[in-house]
Amino acid sequence: MKIIEPHVHMIARTVQDYERMARMHTVAICEPAFWAGYDRTSPQAFHDYFTHISEFEPTRAAQYLIDHYCWICINPKEAEDVGFSREVISFMPEFLNKPNVLGVGEIGLNKNTRNEMIIFEEQVELALQMDQLIWIHTPHLQDKLKGSKMMLDYLVGHGGVDPARVCFDHTEEHTLPMLHEKGFWCAMTVYPVTKNSPERVIDLVEKFGLDRMIVDASGDWGPSDPATLHDTLFQMRLRGHSDKSVEQLFYNNPCRFLGQLGKFKPQPTD
Amino acid sequence: MLTYNVTEPAIELFGITPYGMTMKSPKTAPELVDQFYLHMRSALIETAAAFDRIQVADAASEVWQDPRLVELREAALIIAGDQPERARQILELLSVKEEEEA
Ligand SMILES: [Zn+2]
């Protein structure tokens, strides 16, 4: 069975992670643009970063027969300075037009501030103008519920956003139901301590079904591990689910969501 | 929120949950207890031990009413109760409330 990792920051990972993912049958991965652990000192630093994730990481991945795709945006943690953010947004289109860039992401909120929301909205508009998919980061811990509601209300109230082209990531028991009910894709991140465990992800799948559900490990510079995705696949099998259902969750679903623009090469098996 | 119970024949027939439907665990409750009991036991003991560790440390009285710890004691009551969706209830309890500033 082939696996897709829809969210991993390979810029922060070693080559051993590529090796391990290849051994665990991961055939394609997606790298959303995010915070590097420190605030960049100029918009140009984002240009360099976008070049790295859209040009260099694909060559590292290719050595392990993994297709590498990325998402481009100004992340919410660096979106507080509106003028700075707009400069970054001004050169996003040149990257969004590349054949391995899937859309605008991971945009979203961090501390749910007014400025973060302004930049979120402007990037949604850019995505709509350029007919792009949208990948959304929901805030951490105690801020997740409020921030998820703010973005949901905005997108539903907007009127021009097709929820089938938007995925909310890092969803949990308290945020997934309201997002899923409105027709959005929901990604569940398996991340030690601060997000979901493999067990809780399969609980959510049992409760809400397989439709519009995605799992990712969000490996980054923190205490994370791309293998938690595969731990979750194993948990699903331990819980007695069929191979077909497992394949739908870990391969066919991401193929369907990510493949909507025709750039993502892996094809669903069903 | 709309959910549907999938009938067992549907699962048998397609081996897969139709879109828009829930996917009941194929395991029975006794099987799930066997699978998860030690994990549940461990998680509760770890939390109890952390409370003990804090309580015997210097300046324990300063943090005993820390809102984070107060919320965790409330969370323990949610676990002990009979209402379902305990994880969701605890996550909501630990969230910034709508009217609060983030
Ligand atoms: Zn991320």
Image: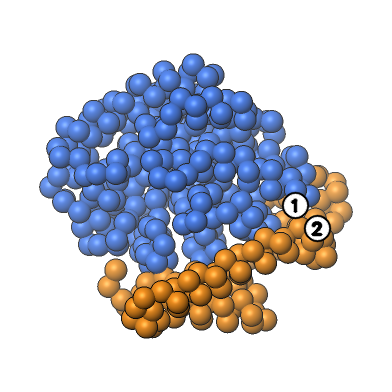
Chain colours: A blue, B orange
Residue at the disc numbered 2: B27
Residue in the picture at 87% in, 54% down: B9
Residue in the picture at 20% in, 33% down: A45
* Image mark for residue A239: 1
Label 1 resides on the chain identified as A
Tags 1 and 2 touching, CB below 8 Å: yes
Quadrant in which the C terminus of chain A is drawn: top right
Q: How many marks?
A: 2
Q: Would residue A256 be seen by someone viewing this image from the given angle?
A: no
Residue in the picture at 16% in, 51% down: A81
Q: Which residue occupies the foreground of this view, A258 or A26? A: A26
As drawn, A249 above or below A261: below
Label 2 residue SS:
loop
Point out residue A107 in the picture as x, y percentages from the top left corner: 34, 47
Point out residue A66 in the picture as x, y percentages from the top left corner: 52, 23
Q: Is residue B31 left or right of residue A108?
A: right
